[in-house]
């Protein structure tokens, strides 16, 4: 097929970017991802087994405070609880993967809190709604039960919120939500799921793991995050690829790649079908291993390059990460669970004359808003380093705020924010998918690259993951629940 220039591509696809609808993906950050990753109707179009569904996250709700000087001596605590319960019933429906249990209304006393704390071990997380003024000790007693916890304290419920930052500084994994907006309850519940989901997750590692030493250690990953790393040989991948029905691979290639593409530039139809065959092979291995993510240090070799495979996995709300990069893999898994958005692993480049960072790579998701979003326009290209295999040139949305992040050493989240200002017109060099992002101070970012905590080879030092949306403040909240430090590279 004839070659299309990047500028022609941008013109042809300009109307296809789309926007998030109010109350859509942003309101349901993980439900759509889990529906895609567990629903057989979405994953079995080309045959094979569906992904196993994860159980709902049980969040024990406790209402603390039956009255007193604040909010008012005539405070009707049971009526207030009914309002919260009605709202949380809607949250259960919208999130689709949480179950609120408990629901006790207790006086603001230590004995009452102690009795409820004994029941919390049957749940995955705790949501503590602070209703009226009293002592902070009952709240602390519930937090000390050891579950990922959030305290919701609306204005005039009292002053016990003052003590929570001290508990956080002491290492308690409790999120403080001081707000009059019930929507913040929903956002807190969404974050409470993340530590639970990380403990339930399995990540396939094909070939040697790469990245910071803690992230490459199965034992340390299990200890810090609860996530299990599952080694899989490249020989098993090759055998699974060989076992895929060629007709199923052809149907997958035609339906998901060839027909929707804006243009096919270099690859042949046979190359695309071969890449689709690898996706179906990887899918079956992930189902067999009950895995939610995969990374491979063999993704540039036979039987096919992994670009299309990882792209579709990320489109579905799962994680496919290139080059065996464990730090980026875990980052993508965290963001998928917390915010429902897939990541774009990039090789960043700086243009200090414009205070810009250029992000470029040959593997990109096409559903950057999440699994229920529209696919971005894309060209089917070769992988640029070798000019072989199959990869994508994806048109991301100009004007979109982004978060650039990477969890390193299992204890620090490197993070920055920016805005896509153009699709970089360097189509004759570098990786296939390219975006230019405006940042506050590119020179300062270069000076602070790695935040003083990152060391290793070029891939480890270089790779960052780009996500649609500004997630900086919510990542600070999530870091408390996961025991992470947050370092801004800005």
Image (spheres, grey):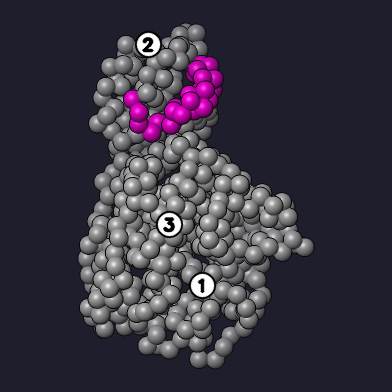
| Front label number (3 vs 2) | 3
Q: Earlier in the sequence, mark 1 or mark 3?
A: 3
| Residue 39 horizontal/vertical position (percent) | 28, 59
Foreground disc of the pair 1, 2: 1
Q: Which residue is mark 1?
A: 362
The answer for how far apart the CA atoms under marks 1 and 3 are is 18 Å
Which residue is tagged 3? 326
In this rendering, is residue 263 above or below 83?
Answer: below
Which residue is painted at 41% across and 67% down in the image?
Answer: 297
At 53% from the left edge and 29% from the top edge, which residue is drawn? Answer: 179
The segment highlighted magenta reads: 145-174
The image position of residue 373, as x and y in percent, is: 45, 61
Q: Earlier in the sequence, mark 3 or mark 2?
A: 2
Cα–Cα span, label 3 and label 2: 45 Å
Can the viewer see residue 89 in this picture? Answer: yes
Q: Is residue 81 visible?
A: no
3 and 2 marks in contact (CB < 8 Å)? no
Which residue is drawn at the image coordinates 24% and 76% (left, top)?
A: 239
Relative placement, left or right, of 354 versus 290 is right
State how many labels appear.
3
Residue 37, position as x, y percentages in the image = 32, 58
Residue for badge 2: 109
Give the class, few, some or many, for how many residues have Cα within 10 Å of label 1's Cα (few <14, many ≥20): many
Relative to 137, residue 171 above or below: below
Q: Residues within 10 Å of mark 3 (few under 14, many from 20)?
A: many
> Compared with residue 380, is residue 196 higher up or lower down, i.e. above or below?
above
Position of 363 relative to 319 (above/below): below
189 or 168, which is in the foreground?
Answer: 168
């Amino acid at each position: 097929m004839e070659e299309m220039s990047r500028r022609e591509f941008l013109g042809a696809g300009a109307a296809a970017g789309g926007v998030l609808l109010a109350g859509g993906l942003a309101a349901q950050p993980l439900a759509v991802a889990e529906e895609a990753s567990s629903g057989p109707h979405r994953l079995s179009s080309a045959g094979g087994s569906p992904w196993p569904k994860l159980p709902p996250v049980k969040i024990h709700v406790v209402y603390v405070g039956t009255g007193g000087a604040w909010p008012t001596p005539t405070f009707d605590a049971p009526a207030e609880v009914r309002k919260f319960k009605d709202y949380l019933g809607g949250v259960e429906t919208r999130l689709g993967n949480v179950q609120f249990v408990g629901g006790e209304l207790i006086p603001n006393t230590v004995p009452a809190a102690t009795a409820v704390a004994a029941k919390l071990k049957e749940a995955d997380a705790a949501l503590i709604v602070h209703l009226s003024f009293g002592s902070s000790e009952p709240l602390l007693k519930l937090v000390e039960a050891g579950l990922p916890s959030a305290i919701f304290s609306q204005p005039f419920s009292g002053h016990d919120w003052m003590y929570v930052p001290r508990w956080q500084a002491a290492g308690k994994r409790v999120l403080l939500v001081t707000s009059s907006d019930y929507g913040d309850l929903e956002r807190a519940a969404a974050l409470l799921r993340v530590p639970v989901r990380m403990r339930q997750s399995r990540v396939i590692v094909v070939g040697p793991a790469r990245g910071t030493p803690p992230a490459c250690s199965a034992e340390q990953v299990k200890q810090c995050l609860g996530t299990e790393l599952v080694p899989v040989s490249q020989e098993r991948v090759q055998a699974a690829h060989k076992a895929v029905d060629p007709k199923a691979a052809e149907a997958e290639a035609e339906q998901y790649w060839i027909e929707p593409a804006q243009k096919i530039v270099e690859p042949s139809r046979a190359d695309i079908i071969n890449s689709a065959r690898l996706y179906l092979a990887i899918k079956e291995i992930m189902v067999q291993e009950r895995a939610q993510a995969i990374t491979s240090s063999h993704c540039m070799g036979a039987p096919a390059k992994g670009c299309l495979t990882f792209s579709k996995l990320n489109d579905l709300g799962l994680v496919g990460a290139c080059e065996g990069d464990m730090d980026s893999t875990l980052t993508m898994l965290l963001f998928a669970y917390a915010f429902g958005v897939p990541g774009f692993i990039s090789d960043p480049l700086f243009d200090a004359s414009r205070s810009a960072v250029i992000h470029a790579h040959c593997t990109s998701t096409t559903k950057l808003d999440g699994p229920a979003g529209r696919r971005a326009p894309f060209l089917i290209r070769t992988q640029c380093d070798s000019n072989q295999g199959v990869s994508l040139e994806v048109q991301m949305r100009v004007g979109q705020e982004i978060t650039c992040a990477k969890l390193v050493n299992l204890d620090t989240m490197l993070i920055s924010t920016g805005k896509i200002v153009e699709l970089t017109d360097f189509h004759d060099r570098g990786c296939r998918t390219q975006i230019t992002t405006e940042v506050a101070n590119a020179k300062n970012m270069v000076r602070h690259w790695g935040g003083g905590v990152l060391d290793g080879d070029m891939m480890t030092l270089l790779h960052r993951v780009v996500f649609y949306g500004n997630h900086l403040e919510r990542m600070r909240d999530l870091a408390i629940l996961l025991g992470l430090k947050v370092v801004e590279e800005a």
